[in-house]
Amino acid sequence: MSSSYPVYSASDMATTGSTSSLGDEATVPVPRWLIDTLDTAPRHGAAERRDAAAPVPTGPAGTADVAPADEPPLSVWVTAQTSPAAQRRGRYVPDSTAHPAKMLPAVAAHAIRHYTRPGDLVFDPMAGSGTTLVEALDAGRRAIGVEYEPHWVAVARANLRFARERGHDVAGEVVQGDARQLPQLLSERYRGQVALVVTSPPYGPSTHGQVVTATTDSDDGKVHKYHHRYGNALDRGNLANVGHQRLLAGFTRILTGCAAVLRPGGHVAITVRPWREHSELIDLPSQIIACGRAAGLIPVERCVALLARVADTDLVARGSFFQRDFIRKQREAGLPLHLIAHEDVVVLRKELTPAARSTAFADGGRGERA
Protein backbone atom coordinates (compact mmCIF):
# COMPACT_ATOMS: atom_id res chain seq x y z
CA MET A 1 0.00 0.00 0.00
CA SER A 2 1.03 3.59 -0.46
CA SER A 3 2.97 4.96 2.48
CA SER A 4 0.75 8.04 2.47
CA TYR A 5 -2.30 5.90 3.15
CA PRO A 6 -3.31 4.23 6.42
CA VAL A 7 -2.07 0.65 6.55
CA TYR A 8 -4.18 -1.90 8.40
CA SER A 9 -2.19 -4.61 10.10
CA ALA A 10 -3.36 -8.09 11.01
CA SER A 11 -4.06 -6.91 14.54
CA ASP A 12 -6.06 -3.95 13.22
CA MET A 13 -8.26 -6.34 11.28
CA ALA A 14 -8.82 -8.30 14.49
CA THR A 15 -8.75 -11.65 12.75
CA THR A 16 -10.12 -14.36 14.97
CA GLY A 17 -9.43 -17.33 12.74
CA SER A 18 -10.74 -18.87 9.59
CA THR A 19 -13.50 -21.30 8.84
CA SER A 20 -12.99 -24.69 7.31
CA SER A 21 -15.96 -24.25 5.01
CA LEU A 22 -15.61 -22.65 1.60
CA GLY A 23 -19.15 -21.32 1.44
CA ASP A 24 -20.17 -17.68 1.02
CA GLU A 25 -20.32 -17.08 4.76
CA ALA A 26 -18.21 -14.48 6.53
CA THR A 27 -14.58 -15.51 6.88
CA VAL A 28 -12.67 -12.53 8.31
CA PRO A 29 -14.13 -10.28 11.05
CA VAL A 30 -13.58 -6.57 10.43
CA PRO A 31 -13.72 -3.95 13.23
CA ARG A 32 -16.63 -1.52 13.28
CA TRP A 33 -14.39 1.55 13.01
CA LEU A 34 -12.96 0.38 9.70
CA ILE A 35 -16.39 -0.37 8.22
CA ASP A 36 -17.63 3.08 9.26
CA THR A 37 -14.60 4.67 7.60
CA LEU A 38 -15.13 2.79 4.35
CA ASP A 39 -18.87 3.46 4.29
CA THR A 40 -18.71 7.16 5.07
CA ALA A 41 -15.47 8.32 3.44
CA PRO A 42 -16.29 11.09 0.91
CA ARG A 43 -15.23 10.81 -2.68
CA HIS A 44 -11.64 11.92 -2.80
CA GLY A 45 -9.53 13.07 -5.70
CA ALA A 46 -5.82 12.91 -6.19
CA ALA A 47 -4.91 16.05 -4.23
CA GLU A 48 -2.41 14.28 -2.01
CA ARG A 49 -1.06 12.24 -4.90
CA ARG A 50 -0.79 15.08 -7.39
CA ASP A 51 2.50 16.86 -7.83
CA ALA A 52 2.33 20.49 -6.69
CA ALA A 53 3.25 21.64 -10.20
CA ALA A 54 0.30 19.84 -11.79
CA PRO A 55 -2.78 21.85 -12.76
CA VAL A 56 -5.76 21.29 -10.48
CA PRO A 57 -8.66 19.90 -12.53
CA THR A 58 -11.87 21.87 -12.33
CA GLY A 59 -15.49 20.95 -12.73
CA PRO A 60 -18.21 22.50 -14.89
CA ALA A 61 -18.28 26.00 -13.36
CA GLY A 62 -14.57 26.14 -12.68
CA THR A 63 -15.12 24.50 -9.32
CA ALA A 64 -12.40 22.20 -8.06
CA ASP A 65 -13.02 18.55 -8.90
CA VAL A 66 -10.71 17.24 -6.18
CA ALA A 67 -11.26 16.81 -2.48
CA PRO A 68 -9.77 19.17 0.13
CA ALA A 69 -6.24 18.26 1.14
CA ASP A 70 -7.29 17.46 4.70
CA GLU A 71 -9.54 14.56 3.64
CA PRO A 72 -7.63 11.35 4.36
CA PRO A 73 -7.52 9.05 1.30
CA LEU A 74 -7.94 5.31 1.66
CA SER A 75 -5.97 2.59 -0.04
CA VAL A 76 -8.82 0.07 0.38
CA TRP A 77 -11.37 0.24 -2.42
CA VAL A 78 -14.81 -1.11 -1.46
CA THR A 79 -15.70 -2.59 -4.85
CA ALA A 80 -17.66 -5.79 -4.17
CA GLN A 81 -20.68 -4.72 -2.14
CA THR A 82 -22.78 -6.25 -4.93
CA SER A 83 -21.94 -9.34 -6.94
CA PRO A 84 -20.17 -9.12 -10.32
CA ALA A 85 -23.39 -10.20 -12.06
CA ALA A 86 -25.39 -7.48 -10.31
CA GLN A 87 -22.81 -4.86 -11.29
CA ARG A 88 -23.18 -5.78 -14.98
CA ARG A 89 -26.92 -6.40 -15.07
CA GLY A 90 -28.69 -4.06 -17.50
CA ARG A 91 -25.42 -2.37 -18.47
CA TYR A 92 -23.59 -5.00 -20.54
CA VAL A 93 -24.72 -7.26 -23.39
CA PRO A 94 -25.19 -10.94 -22.43
CA ASP A 95 -22.17 -12.10 -24.47
CA SER A 96 -19.91 -10.24 -22.02
CA THR A 97 -20.30 -12.97 -19.40
CA ALA A 98 -18.29 -15.43 -21.51
CA HIS A 99 -15.03 -13.47 -21.24
CA PRO A 100 -12.54 -15.49 -19.15
CA ALA A 101 -11.12 -12.52 -17.22
CA LYS A 102 -13.67 -9.77 -16.78
CA MET A 103 -12.58 -6.82 -14.68
CA LEU A 104 -14.98 -5.99 -11.87
CA PRO A 105 -16.94 -2.92 -13.10
CA ALA A 106 -16.77 -1.22 -9.70
CA VAL A 107 -12.95 -1.41 -9.74
CA ALA A 108 -12.73 0.38 -13.09
CA ALA A 109 -15.39 2.88 -12.01
CA HIS A 110 -13.55 3.66 -8.77
CA ALA A 111 -10.26 4.34 -10.59
CA ILE A 112 -12.00 6.51 -13.20
CA ARG A 113 -13.79 8.63 -10.58
CA HIS A 114 -10.64 9.20 -8.55
CA TYR A 115 -8.03 9.86 -11.23
CA THR A 116 -10.02 11.70 -13.91
CA ARG A 117 -12.68 14.35 -14.36
CA PRO A 118 -15.62 14.55 -16.80
CA GLY A 119 -14.48 14.84 -20.40
CA ASP A 120 -11.08 13.23 -19.79
CA LEU A 121 -9.85 10.40 -22.01
CA VAL A 122 -9.56 6.89 -20.52
CA PHE A 123 -7.63 4.12 -22.29
CA ASP A 124 -7.47 0.32 -21.92
CA PRO A 125 -4.82 -1.39 -24.10
CA MET A 126 -6.25 -4.85 -23.33
CA ALA A 127 -9.93 -3.95 -23.43
CA GLY A 128 -11.50 -7.43 -23.46
CA SER A 129 -15.28 -7.09 -23.37
CA GLY A 130 -14.97 -3.35 -22.76
CA THR A 131 -15.51 -2.97 -19.01
CA THR A 132 -13.15 0.00 -18.64
CA LEU A 133 -14.69 1.70 -21.66
CA VAL A 134 -18.28 1.27 -20.49
CA GLU A 135 -17.46 2.57 -17.01
CA ALA A 136 -15.71 5.57 -18.56
CA LEU A 137 -18.73 6.45 -20.69
CA ASP A 138 -21.06 6.00 -17.73
CA ALA A 139 -18.90 8.50 -15.82
CA GLY A 140 -18.95 11.06 -18.64
CA ARG A 141 -15.41 10.34 -19.79
CA ARG A 142 -14.25 9.61 -23.33
CA ALA A 143 -12.84 6.14 -23.93
CA ILE A 144 -10.62 4.22 -26.32
CA GLY A 145 -9.51 0.61 -26.13
CA VAL A 146 -7.34 -1.86 -28.00
CA GLU A 147 -8.25 -5.55 -28.09
CA TYR A 148 -6.42 -8.43 -29.76
CA GLU A 149 -9.23 -10.96 -30.31
CA PRO A 150 -11.82 -10.09 -33.01
CA HIS A 151 -14.66 -11.68 -31.04
CA TRP A 152 -14.07 -9.49 -28.00
CA VAL A 153 -13.66 -6.43 -30.20
CA ALA A 154 -17.20 -7.08 -31.44
CA VAL A 155 -18.51 -7.58 -27.88
CA ALA A 156 -16.79 -4.43 -26.62
CA ARG A 157 -18.27 -2.42 -29.48
CA ALA A 158 -21.70 -3.85 -28.68
CA ASN A 159 -21.26 -2.76 -25.06
CA LEU A 160 -20.36 0.76 -26.19
CA ARG A 161 -23.47 0.88 -28.40
CA PHE A 162 -25.52 -0.33 -25.43
CA ALA A 163 -24.07 2.47 -23.30
CA ARG A 164 -25.02 5.04 -25.92
CA GLU A 165 -28.55 3.60 -26.05
CA ARG A 166 -28.74 4.29 -22.32
CA GLY A 167 -28.12 7.95 -23.11
CA HIS A 168 -24.34 8.33 -22.79
CA ASP A 169 -23.39 10.61 -25.66
CA VAL A 170 -19.61 10.41 -25.14
CA ALA A 171 -16.97 9.34 -27.65
CA GLY A 172 -15.79 5.73 -27.34
CA GLU A 173 -14.07 3.35 -29.72
CA VAL A 174 -12.27 0.00 -29.87
CA VAL A 175 -9.30 -0.71 -32.13
CA GLN A 176 -8.40 -4.28 -33.03
CA GLY A 177 -4.75 -5.23 -32.76
CA ASP A 178 -1.82 -6.28 -30.61
CA ALA A 179 -1.29 -3.79 -27.79
CA ARG A 180 2.46 -4.32 -28.07
CA GLN A 181 2.17 -2.33 -31.31
CA LEU A 182 0.41 0.75 -29.93
CA PRO A 183 2.45 3.25 -32.01
CA GLN A 184 1.15 1.58 -35.17
CA LEU A 185 -2.41 1.11 -33.88
CA LEU A 186 -3.26 4.51 -32.42
CA SER A 187 -3.42 7.79 -34.25
CA GLU A 188 -0.85 10.44 -33.40
CA ARG A 189 -3.73 12.62 -32.15
CA TYR A 190 -3.89 10.49 -28.99
CA ARG A 191 -0.30 11.25 -28.06
CA GLY A 192 -0.20 12.94 -24.65
CA GLN A 193 -4.01 13.04 -24.38
CA VAL A 194 -4.89 10.13 -22.08
CA ALA A 195 -5.63 11.01 -18.45
CA LEU A 196 -5.88 7.43 -17.17
CA VAL A 197 -5.06 3.90 -18.31
CA VAL A 198 -7.03 1.13 -16.60
CA THR A 199 -6.09 -2.44 -17.50
CA SER A 200 -5.03 -5.86 -16.27
CA PRO A 201 -2.57 -8.48 -17.58
CA PRO A 202 -3.91 -11.93 -18.49
CA TYR A 203 -3.44 -14.61 -15.84
CA GLY A 204 -4.00 -17.72 -17.92
CA PRO A 205 -6.87 -20.22 -17.53
CA SER A 206 -6.37 -21.24 -13.89
CA THR A 207 -8.52 -18.53 -12.29
CA HIS A 208 -11.08 -17.92 -15.03
CA GLY A 209 -14.06 -19.49 -16.68
CA GLN A 210 -17.43 -20.98 -15.88
CA VAL A 211 -18.63 -24.47 -14.99
CA VAL A 212 -21.53 -26.85 -15.26
CA THR A 213 -22.04 -29.33 -12.46
CA ALA A 214 -24.34 -32.20 -11.55
CA THR A 215 -26.77 -29.68 -10.05
CA THR A 216 -26.80 -27.44 -13.14
CA ASP A 217 -26.52 -28.59 -16.75
CA SER A 218 -23.96 -31.39 -16.71
CA ASP A 219 -25.14 -34.35 -18.80
CA ASP A 220 -22.83 -36.87 -17.13
CA GLY A 221 -22.95 -35.50 -13.58
CA LYS A 222 -19.32 -34.33 -13.75
CA VAL A 223 -17.87 -30.87 -13.51
CA HIS A 224 -17.02 -29.33 -16.88
CA LYS A 225 -15.14 -26.08 -17.44
CA TYR A 226 -15.91 -23.66 -20.28
CA HIS A 227 -15.24 -20.07 -21.34
CA HIS A 228 -11.88 -20.37 -19.60
CA ARG A 229 -9.43 -19.71 -22.41
CA TYR A 230 -8.46 -16.73 -24.51
CA GLY A 231 -9.14 -17.55 -28.17
CA ASN A 232 -6.94 -20.15 -29.83
CA ALA A 233 -4.51 -21.68 -27.32
CA LEU A 234 -2.00 -22.15 -30.16
CA ASP A 235 -1.92 -18.44 -30.98
CA ARG A 236 1.42 -17.29 -29.56
CA GLY A 237 0.61 -13.71 -30.48
CA ASN A 238 -1.85 -13.70 -27.58
CA LEU A 239 -0.10 -12.75 -24.31
CA ALA A 240 -2.39 -15.15 -22.43
CA ASN A 241 -0.69 -18.05 -24.21
CA VAL A 242 2.97 -17.19 -23.63
CA GLY A 243 5.32 -17.96 -20.78
CA HIS A 244 5.81 -15.84 -17.71
CA GLN A 245 8.93 -14.01 -18.86
CA ARG A 246 7.46 -13.26 -22.28
CA LEU A 247 4.34 -11.96 -20.59
CA LEU A 248 6.41 -9.50 -18.53
CA ALA A 249 8.42 -8.41 -21.56
CA GLY A 250 5.24 -7.91 -23.58
CA PHE A 251 3.53 -5.99 -20.79
CA THR A 252 6.57 -3.71 -20.46
CA ARG A 253 6.26 -2.91 -24.14
CA ILE A 254 2.55 -2.19 -23.70
CA LEU A 255 3.25 0.16 -20.79
CA THR A 256 5.89 1.93 -22.88
CA GLY A 257 3.23 2.60 -25.50
CA CYS A 258 0.81 3.73 -22.80
CA ALA A 259 3.39 6.21 -21.48
CA ALA A 260 3.50 7.83 -24.90
CA VAL A 261 -0.25 8.52 -25.00
CA LEU A 262 -0.50 9.58 -21.34
CA ARG A 263 -0.57 13.28 -20.63
CA PRO A 264 2.01 14.63 -18.14
CA GLY A 265 0.92 13.58 -14.65
CA GLY A 266 -1.50 10.99 -16.07
CA HIS A 267 -2.02 7.73 -14.19
CA VAL A 268 -2.02 4.00 -14.97
CA ALA A 269 -4.10 1.71 -12.72
CA ILE A 270 -3.38 -2.00 -13.15
CA THR A 271 -5.39 -4.67 -11.35
CA VAL A 272 -3.19 -7.68 -10.64
CA ARG A 273 -2.85 -10.45 -8.11
CA PRO A 274 -0.19 -12.99 -7.15
CA TRP A 275 -0.68 -16.61 -8.15
CA ARG A 276 0.79 -19.94 -7.19
CA GLU A 277 2.76 -22.11 -9.55
CA HIS A 278 3.57 -25.56 -8.13
CA SER A 279 2.72 -24.13 -4.66
CA GLU A 280 5.25 -21.32 -5.12
CA LEU A 281 3.89 -17.78 -4.79
CA ILE A 282 4.59 -15.59 -7.84
CA ASP A 283 4.57 -11.92 -6.80
CA LEU A 284 3.15 -10.59 -10.05
CA PRO A 285 2.21 -7.15 -8.60
CA SER A 286 5.84 -6.39 -7.75
CA GLN A 287 6.92 -7.63 -11.17
CA ILE A 288 4.35 -5.36 -12.84
CA ILE A 289 5.74 -2.42 -10.87
CA ALA A 290 9.18 -3.29 -12.27
CA CYS A 291 7.66 -3.35 -15.77
CA GLY A 292 6.25 0.13 -15.16
CA ARG A 293 9.62 1.46 -14.06
CA ALA A 294 11.23 0.00 -17.17
CA ALA A 295 8.60 1.84 -19.25
CA GLY A 296 9.55 5.15 -17.63
CA LEU A 297 6.55 5.35 -15.27
CA ILE A 298 6.69 6.27 -11.60
CA PRO A 299 5.06 3.93 -9.03
CA VAL A 300 2.92 6.06 -6.71
CA GLU A 301 0.44 3.71 -4.97
CA ARG A 302 -0.29 0.07 -4.28
CA CYS A 303 -3.92 -0.25 -3.23
CA VAL A 304 -6.38 -3.02 -2.44
CA ALA A 305 -9.59 -3.50 -4.44
CA LEU A 306 -11.90 -5.74 -2.46
CA LEU A 307 -13.40 -8.79 -4.16
CA ALA A 308 -15.33 -9.56 -0.97
CA ARG A 309 -18.33 -7.77 0.50
CA VAL A 310 -17.86 -5.66 3.62
CA ALA A 311 -20.71 -6.64 5.97
CA ASP A 312 -21.56 -5.18 9.37
CA THR A 313 -18.81 -7.05 11.18
CA ASP A 314 -17.32 -9.35 8.59
CA LEU A 315 -15.73 -9.67 5.17
CA VAL A 316 -17.79 -12.00 2.96
CA ALA A 317 -15.76 -13.83 0.32
CA ARG A 318 -17.03 -14.16 -3.24
CA GLY A 319 -14.66 -16.90 -4.40
CA SER A 320 -15.24 -18.55 -7.76
CA PHE A 321 -15.75 -22.29 -8.17
CA PHE A 322 -12.15 -22.66 -9.35
CA GLN A 323 -10.73 -20.72 -6.42
CA ARG A 324 -12.75 -22.78 -3.95
CA ASP A 325 -11.72 -26.03 -5.61
CA PHE A 326 -8.06 -24.98 -5.64
CA ILE A 327 -8.13 -23.94 -1.98
CA ARG A 328 -9.83 -27.21 -0.97
CA LYS A 329 -7.18 -29.29 -2.74
CA GLN A 330 -4.34 -27.23 -1.28
CA ARG A 331 -5.72 -27.60 2.23
CA GLU A 332 -6.08 -31.33 1.76
CA ALA A 333 -2.41 -31.33 0.72
CA GLY A 334 -1.45 -29.52 3.93
CA LEU A 335 -1.05 -25.97 2.59
CA PRO A 336 -3.35 -23.66 4.66
CA LEU A 337 -4.45 -21.24 1.95
CA HIS A 338 -7.48 -18.95 2.05
CA LEU A 339 -9.86 -17.57 -0.56
CA ILE A 340 -8.67 -14.47 -2.37
CA ALA A 341 -10.54 -11.44 -1.04
CA HIS A 342 -8.86 -8.65 -3.01
CA GLU A 343 -6.81 -7.66 -6.01
CA ASP A 344 -3.80 -5.40 -5.84
CA VAL A 345 -4.13 -2.15 -7.77
CA VAL A 346 -0.74 -0.89 -8.87
CA VAL A 347 -0.91 2.83 -9.67
CA LEU A 348 1.80 4.41 -11.79
CA ARG A 349 2.18 7.99 -12.99
CA LYS A 350 3.83 9.71 -15.93
CA GLU A 351 6.32 12.36 -14.93
CA LEU A 352 5.12 15.95 -15.16
CA THR A 353 8.09 17.23 -17.15
CA PRO A 354 9.11 15.19 -20.22
CA ALA A 355 12.64 13.84 -20.09
CA ALA A 356 15.01 14.12 -23.02
CA ARG A 357 14.71 10.62 -24.34
CA SER A 358 13.21 8.77 -27.28
CA THR A 359 9.51 8.09 -27.26
CA ALA A 360 7.57 5.00 -28.23
CA PHE A 361 5.74 6.79 -31.02
CA ALA A 362 8.90 8.45 -32.33
CA ASP A 363 10.94 5.25 -32.45
CA GLY A 364 8.23 3.12 -34.01
CA GLY A 365 7.61 1.08 -30.87
CA ARG A 366 11.03 -0.56 -30.59
CA GLY A 367 10.86 -0.39 -26.80
CA GLU A 368 12.76 2.79 -25.82
CA ARG A 369 11.27 4.63 -22.88
CA ALA A 370 8.53 7.19 -23.36
Image: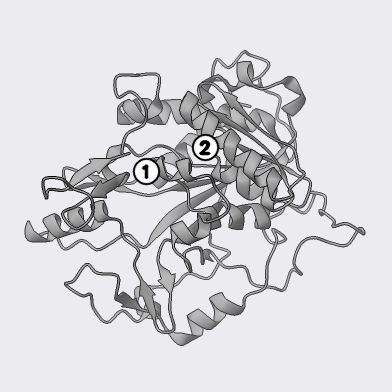
Q: In what element is the residue under mark 2? A: helix
Residue at 16%, 72% (x, y): give it.
20
Q: Is residue 288 left or right of residue 190?
A: left
Residue at 75%, 34% (x, y): give it.
193
Q: Quadrant of the C terminus?
A: top right
Q: Which residue is mark 2?
A: 292
Residue 227 visible: yes
In this picture, is 19 found above or below 125? below
In this picture, is 18 found above or below 247? below
Of 208 and 50, nearer the camera is: 208
Residue 323, picture quadrant: bottom left
Residue 11 point in image, percent of width and height: 35, 79
Q: In what element is the residue under mark 1? A: helix
Residue 270 point in image, percent of width and height: 51, 45
Furthest-bottom residue in view?
A: 32
Residue at 53%, 29% (x, y): give it.
153
Of 217 and 306, nearer the camera is: 217
Dot 2: few (<14), some (14–19), or many (≥20) neighbours within 10 Å? many
Q: Which residue is mark 1?
A: 284
- What amino acid does circle 2 point to? Gly
Furthest-left residue in view?
A: 333
Residue 268 visible: no
Residue 113 point in image, percent of width and height: 67, 57
Model colouring: one colour
Numbered mark located on residue 311 in the image: none
Of 203 and 169, nearer the camera is: 169
In this picture, is 153 found above or below 4? above
Residue 30 point in image, percent of width and height: 40, 80
Dot 1: few (<14), some (14–19), or many (≥20) neighbours within 10 Å? some
Q: Are marks 2 and 1 in contact (CB under 8 Å)?
A: no
Q: Earlier in the sequence, mark 2 or mark 1?
A: 1
In this picture, is 140 found above or below 98? below
